[in-house]
Amino acid sequence: MDGGTDTKEIYENVMNILEDLTSNAHKLQEQVLEEILKSNAGTEYLSRFFPNGQADKQSFKTNVPIITYEDIKPYIDRIANGDTPSILLAYRITQFIQSSGTSGGQPKLIPMTVESFEKRMYEPLLPDLVIKRCFNGSDEGKSLYLYFIKPEMETPSGLVASLYTTFYFKTKSFKTGLAKFCTSPIETILCSDNKQSMFCQLLTGLLQRDEVVRMGSSFASVLPRSIKFLDDYWKELCSNIRTGYLSDWITDAGCRNAMSLILTRPNPEMADLIQQICEDKSWEGIIKKLWPKIKYITSICTGSMSQYIPLLEFYGGGIPLVSPNYSSSEACFGINLKPLSKPFDVSYTFLPNTAYFEFLPVNKDGGGKARDTRTIDKPVDLVNVKLGQYYEVVVTTLTGLYRYRIGDVLKVTGFYNKSPQFQFVERQNVVLSIDLDKTTEEDLSKAIMKAKIVLEPLGIMLTTYSSYADTSLMPGRYVLFWELKMKGRNDLPKLDAEIMEQCCCIVEESFDFTYKSLRKGGIISGLELRVVKHGTFDQLMDYYVSKGASITQYKPPSCLKSKEAVKILNSGMVGKFFSSKTMF
Ligand code: AMP
């Protein structure tokens, strides 16, 4: 964007669009459902539910079942194996989008059509403009966005299957839009070797350090990993800048070509400056120091990503952390209309034109526990959700998902015009459980947030965590993995057994009545806390990436299900502690 007036006009237009969308939420939702039914009611999947051919909203709600991926998987598999897509949707499928929801899960295949992409094309632009509007001068300058791709797959029928981000980074819309403002040349983003890609993206980011006004990634998990990479490679990055010569191990032709246009001459002055900053004993505020004009960091940091907030605030040195949107491979849900709100207070305003939304009430009893939603009340429409209530979101899309459970639990925090605003609470069914206890992702996160306060005065930071229910012994117990580091550098903290045991007790005390009574009755034994050294969770991410997860869309698993994952974390263990609590 150039002239100030033009920019102002663009912002005004965006706000007018948002006003219009949110004021007409009900009408737009009706239209979206009508369009879907008009096009797709005759498909093999849907027509079964409309025996007399009447595919109106009422019959849709009465007859079409609420489903999970397993229910449509047979149809998807048939299409992947060569059957006509019209068994599920009326449009031609251009490719599949691979979605994992959680990085540990099996990837699902979601159909993508020309029509659906046309609708989603502008998705990243809206939050981007809403954010820029809040930060003076951020429409100038460049974005250090760390984006990565994952190699595509092909189904037996010849359809490509890729992650949504991989697909999007290859579109003309990205190349001619957002990419133009990125410090990373498109070739470095499209390099399928993540290490070469990361090195080149950080190098170009450093070379253009005086132009960078924002830094970001799709999900927050990428940023601490990038800073860790910077910590491991800054000497080599500086040497490349000093000599003007790209490291030989960067062999990707696209990367080398693109870098040759940016790394054009030796720049010892810049190398000295960066070296001086990186040699600093403390990396507090390193982002602000390396990129002095930066105004904000943008990355999804709600839900399971919230564990990275303290670390990002530490590295950011006071730069606002903005969580832009709530979206998935299946649909775009909403955007954050208050980019300046504190990361833990973020709500997303639903966009009523992107899919048809329904909400399954989730009962949270006094202890904040989500009960099984399969046996509960009927779903409600977007405009009928109630303030303060918890819901699981269900979508119907043009791409063959009909009353499809996304698996996310949300809480209504307000309305913008007629559109509800939601806080992301947790993934449904991510629970620790030994007996009758059910400790959800949110319960765990809250308990850990309380316990880690004890470590703060000692200068110890909890950088990331995970857990699993260990039932190999009787009675079973919860095991937590914490990656800890000293605030200044990545040194391993000296662990005081008494303090660590206190953390175990605080976590247990924060759990609900059921947990505590089972613990008191000896059905669950004392919680175990395993401290792992800095970098261990990077190995866990590498493991999931090797199994098919992507770095860009990586979601750290709060509860581990895989033995291999537990083994990886155990291998970095430097101390274990137990709750000594005997009575509640
Ligand atoms: P995927 O389609 O594999 O990238 O995963 C989508 C999932 O990521 C969603 O269903 C959520 O569980 C999670 N997710 C997406 N956006 C957010 C957000 N803003 N806050 C928390 N979790 C999110």
Image: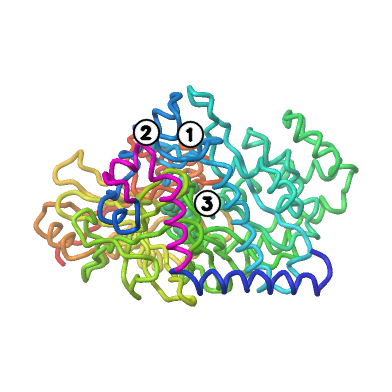
Q: Three-letter amino acid code at disc 1?
A: Gly
- Could you tell me which residue is drawn at 75 percent across and 49 percent down? 176
Q: Position of residue 465 (x, y in %)?
A: 41, 52
Q: Secondary structure at mark 1?
A: loop
Query: Mark 3 or mark 2: which comes first in sequence?
Result: 2
Majority secondary structure of the magenta segment?
helix
Report the residue that reaches farthest toward the right.
Answer: 265
- Could you tell me which residue is drawn at 29 percent across and 65 percent down? 506
Task: Answer with left or right where residue 116 lies relative to residue 293.
Answer: left
- For the record, the magenta segment spans 27-54
Residue at the disc numbered 3:
221
Q: Is residue 269 above or below residue 198?
A: below
- Could you tell me which residue is drawn at 39 percent across and 28 percent down? 78
Q: Three-letter amino acid code at disc 3?
A: Ser
**Closer to the camera: disc 3 or disc 1?**
1
**Closer to the camera: disc 2 or disc 1?**
2
- Mark 1 CB in 8 Å range of ligand 1? no
Q: Nearer the viewer, residue 499 or 353?
A: 353
